[in-house]
Amino acid sequence: EADIYQTPRYLVIGTGKKITLECSQTMGHDKMYWYQQDPGMELHLIHYSYGVNSTEKGDLSSESTVSRIRTEHFPLTLESARPSHTSQYLCASSEERGRHPGYTFGSGTRLTVV
Amino acid sequence: GDSVTQMEGPVTLSEEAFLTINCTYTATGYPSLFWYVQYPGEGLQLLLKATKADDKGSNKGFEATYRKETTSFHLEKGSVQVSDSAVYFCALYKSSGDKLTFGTGTRLAVRP
């Protein structure tokens, strides 16, 4: 049973639209992450958060933004979608356990911008 | 910086064949090493892990041994099944960097 939920699973949207991808976890994890997965499967960290009111940019520059107002919720927003944003977006959370971060991933949102 | 290199796929095998997916890493210090699996249409799931040199991680018939001398963490399974068809990601974690660094993934297809 998944403890981290992403909605929607699939989204097809027109260029220029504003979208928000939802991610929620019920495990009380402080750390949350957004990864972008390109068609070649490679994963790129685009945003992360260490807790409420904490957000940081990841390794890959992204036009998306995130917020963390509640521990369990970490939504990602695109103000104006473009075809180059077409990708799979994976949300994850982790607990602090020293050498084993215990990442849990959601099932992903596959976004297509037409 | 830290990096993970995986063998390129796709890897195509017949059912009951032996599987090896190579993974090597570059990192300072003592990272923890992981294999994640992504089934079609799903997110990533932790398959196995090893946190120090010579540790062997195992799960669901898969094994990988943390070899510091060769900076490797190769994934093996003695007899693959069609249900093992998925994408496999090798990853490393260091508490100093506080993030997972993934390889590029290796797609495995198992034929009946």
Image: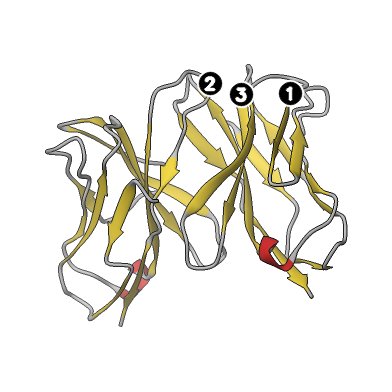
Please, which chain is the residue tagged with disc 2 on? Answer: A
Q: CA distance from mark 3 to mark 2?
A: 8 Å
Is the residue A84 above or below the residue A61 in the image?
Answer: below
Please, which chain is the residue tagged with disc 1 on? Answer: B
Q: Percent x, y for residue B108?
A: 71, 63
Question: Dot 1 corresponds to which residue?
Answer: B55
The quadrant of the rendering that contains the C terminus of chain A is bottom left
- Residue occupying the point 21% across, 40% down: A72
Is the residue A5 above or below the residue A101 in the image?
Answer: below
Residue B60 in the figure: left or right of residue A34: right
Q: Percent x, y for residue A54?
A: 20, 31
Question: Dot 3 corresponds to which residue?
Answer: B31
Judge depth for marks 3 and 2 and give the one in front: 2
Question: Dot 2 corresponds to which residue?
Answer: A99
Quarter-of-image position of residue A36: bottom left
Question: CB under 8 Å between callouts 1 and 2?
Answer: no
Looking at the rendered structure, the secondary structure element under dot 1 is: loop
Q: CA distance from mark 1 to mark 2?
A: 13 Å
Q: How many marks?
A: 3
Type of amino acid at the residue the image marks with label 3? Pro
